[in-house]
Amino acid sequence: MWHFISEQISQSINTDFICDDVRDIPEGDSHQTFRISDGKHRFFVKVNEKIQLTNFQAEAEGLEHLNKIELFKVPKVITHGVVSNHSFLVLEYIHMQQGDDKGWRNFGHLLATMHREHKQEMFGWQDDNYIGRTPQYNKWQKNWSQFYAEQRIGYQLQRLAEKGHQLANIEKVIESVKTLLGGHNPESSMLHGDLWQGNTGFFKNQAVLFDPAFHYGDRETDLAMTELFGRFPEEFYQGYNDNWPLSTDYQYRKPIYQLYHTLNHALLFEGHYLDSAKTMLKNLDS
């Protein structure tokens, strides 16, 4: 496998690369991850079953679009493909560090700048992709409340029901979400889509973004995700609000936006996430 991947890397970087050092890097549970090197070049490699190639292709596309805006350090896509019964994705290897207060403040400022990229009037994306291992539908939609209620919350509830977890009446929840978001008409912003600290870092105090679930939507969904599994440092939010302040109504919508990721974790990991999802669903109409 590594010989074939080395050949693909060589073709992509236009110089010989012969992998002679493979190091396992434990990172999450979605894929096997490695750092490979020939003594001169280092790359980050994700490996999974052959069927996961579409996941890697979607990730590569998201990374390439984030790279185009030139605001963050985003790992360059080297190559991806299939060898034997495995799919793989090769990325630029970035040695990440902790950010300081200035770095986090600048991170927030730049995220607001990215969210201002209003080149798209509709919500969604040209392709479906993934949120973790879960398919994420991105059919273009002009109405934000309809897009979010149906393609985010409704879809996750349907997937859970198919696994035997009927958490609520799906149609009723969809209508509740549409009602709750009905008066909110956000601009369509370029989003990371899965913005928690596990998908961020710093390189020479420049913010790094990776593992996106790229699409266009309400900027508040990115911010809500930053608060779900432990808030980012306060300097991040200061930098963001200095550039583009959030509405005071964001706090009202935040639980609705965090519900999507909680449902996804319930789908992937079950356990206490199922209980959290049930509680959040009950609170929708309270």
Image (cartoon, helix red, strand yellow):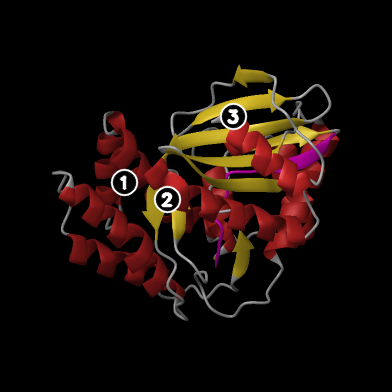
Q: Is residue 211 above or below residue 36?
A: below
> Which residue matches tag 2?
255
Q: Which quarter of the figure has residue 48? A: top left
| Magenta residues, start to end | 205-216
Name the residue tied to disc 3: 2
Badge 3 vs badge 2, beta-carbon distance below 8 Å: no
Residue 64 % position (x, y)? 68, 57
Q: Is residue 73 visible?
A: no
N-terminal-most mark, 2 or 1: 2
Classify 10 Å Cα crowding around label 3: few (below 14), some (14-19), many (20 and above).
Answer: few
Label 1 SS: helix
Nearest to viewer (mark 1 / mark 3): 3
**Vertical comparison of 129 with 140: above or below:** above
- Measure the C-alpha gap from mark 3 to mark 2: 44 Å
Residue in the foreground of this view, choosing between 277 and 120: 120
**Is residue 158 part of the magenta span, yes or no?**
no
Cα distance in 3D space between marks 1 and 3? 45 Å
Identify the residue at horizontal 52%, vertical 48% (top origin).
56
Q: Amino acid at mark 1?
A: Met
**Amino acid bearing label 2:** Pro
Tell me the residue that label 1 is attached to: 280
Q: Quadrant of residue 173?
A: bottom left
Q: Are there few (<14), some (14-19), or many (20+) residues within 10 Å of tag 2?
A: some
